[in-house]
Amino acid sequence: MKYKKGIAIVLSVAAGICLGIFILNNVLEKKVAEFLSENFPNETLTYKTLDVNMLFSELELCEIYFTSGNQKISTQKLEVNGIHFWQLLMDGKVEVQSIFIDKPQITYFKGAADSTEKETDTFKRNVEIHRLEIDDGHFALFGKEGNRIFSVKRLDLEINDIYLDGETLKRKIPFDYGKHFVKIENLFCDCDEYHNIQIAKFYFSNKKIRAKNLELLPKYSRPEFRKKVSHERDIYNLKIASLSFDNPKFGFNAENLFFTSTLLRIEGADFKIYRDKTLPDDTRYKELYSEKLREAKLKLDIKNVEISESFIQYQERIKFDRSLGTVAFYDVNAEISNLTNRNLADENFPLTKVNVRAHFMNTTDLYVNWEFRVNDEDERFTISGNAGKIPPAAMNPFFVPAMQIKAKGNLDALYFNFGGNNIRGNGDLRVNYSDFKIEVLKKNGDKNKFLSAIANLFVKKSPKNGTVTTSGIAVVRDQTKSFWNYFWTLIEEGLLKSMT
């Protein structure tokens, strides 16, 4: 009899506990529902089911739909585990162990009126999330005209130790966070008026950023692009097999975004540049790279850059009735150190060094050493290098369309050493010639014998077979042209002096 009575007591206690849990679960579900309605009073927030399990400190929302003026969000499931219900009920503090979001789809329309904006000082809660996971997320950002600005077809992420409150919400990055890992597939970005960026796969963690199959592509064909611009402008077509940053860090100092990394690697780049010089010149001032970096809003500090197995091609349309002038560099390998524009006032501000090895026009090795200091407002630089034998096949793809001249014979070796600033450049050049002469071409590309004979009268006999060293080369920089035009002007001046 006592045994049966004991069982009855146990069952009664268990039933009471179950009833208490059931009641508390209902109370908590109501509290959560009230919390959602209080914190999103002006938005449309619906969900199919809301389940709270106080015993296991869990909450689950299914088939959520949220709209707020300029944004729409939907997700299959939201799981919250390890909820500190007591803190939530007593003081409104939100602390959870983990949040899992399954297949969220986020659409944001830039420029649309957002009726949900709140003053951040009205947000009184402290929110701590020890781990946030998103599986198979989708995101799209559209402009005022309905054009796609940014999109991601798949987003998987894990972020640990998230904290936010009214103060963090005032910052550019509105929360603190710890270790993180982000994986993105099929990223698209409308990066400027004329180009888009596409990335097949993108990984981002505390230790590394890596992008695979990155592409910077023109929005328009060359004839279409010509109609869109009023003056000369480059079209870029860039493809990179792999790009990575080691030990990346980023954030905001005042209004400026900063980014640091110990190493940037670029592997297998294919970079094609095209310029239509039949258009009017762009006569605006062009900064040298030191000034361009110094004035950039993005503050960088990349200790080392390594570029390997890459290709660069530059083409010019000089006249409609001529072929494109072409210069190409194969198997480009480069090291850059101290690519930085931070802490410009430091007494020991580092020198930026660029060392390049390439195969010029797929015929000869080229070596270039270039140095400048980003904080130097005089924009001083040095650039030196050398190339091996340059045959006519390497020179004429540019000489013929650009200058209507054809080179015959070889430049057996070329050495240069230049320095300069934003106003003028100078230096030395040495050339080894071998049976070198010039033919001036007619409009149809045939040799103009008379002009060729005149041209070769002005070419010294000694340079045709021998070594010529030209010192005292000096040019005044055209500040409406790029650094590379400046560099080519120094080379050109040295070649002309060595031949005449």
Image (cartoon, helix red, strand yellow):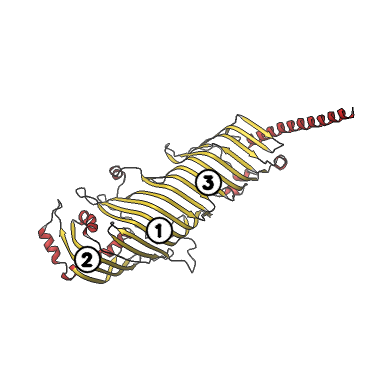
Classify mark 2: residues with Cα within 10 Å, few (<14), some (14-19) or many (20+). Answer: few
Residues under labels 3 and 2: Cα distance? Answer: 55 Å
Q: Which residue is mark 3?
A: 182
Furthest toward the right, the residue is 1
User: Could you say which is closer to the camera, residue 263 or residue 320?
Assistant: 263
Residues under labels 1 and 2: Cα distance? Answer: 31 Å
Check whether the beta carbons of the residues at disc 1 and disc 2 lie within 8 A of each other.
Answer: no
Classify mark 3: residues with Cα within 10 Å, few (<14), some (14-19) or many (20+). Answer: some
Q: Quadrant of residue 42?
A: top right
In the figure, is residue 323 to the left or right of 9?
Answer: left
Specify the label residue 329 is tagged with. Answer: none
Residue 369 higher or lower than 322, as above or below: below
Residue 101: x %, y % from top left: 58, 38
Q: How many marks?
A: 3
SS at circle 3: strand
Identity, as a three-letter code, of the amino acid under mark 1 = Lys
In this rendering, the label closer to the viewer, 1 or 2: 2
Q: Which residue is mark 1?
A: 292
At x 42% / y 61%, what residue is drawn?
A: 336
Residue 174 higher or lower than 63, as above or below: below
Residue 440: x %, y % from top left: 15, 58
First along the sequence among labels 3 and 1: 3
Classify mark 1: residues with Cα within 10 Å, few (<14), some (14-19) or many (20+). Answer: few
Residue 182: x %, y % from top left: 52, 46
Residue 486 higher or lower than 215, as above or below: below
Q: Which residue is mark 2?
A: 496
Residue 45 can be seen, yes or no: no
Residues under labels 3 and 1: Cα distance? Answer: 31 Å
Residue 178: x %, y % from top left: 59, 51
Check whether the beta carbons of the residues at disc 3 and disc 2 lie within 8 A of each other.
Answer: no
In this rendering, the label closer to the viewer, 3 or 2: 3
Quadrant showing the C terminus: bottom left
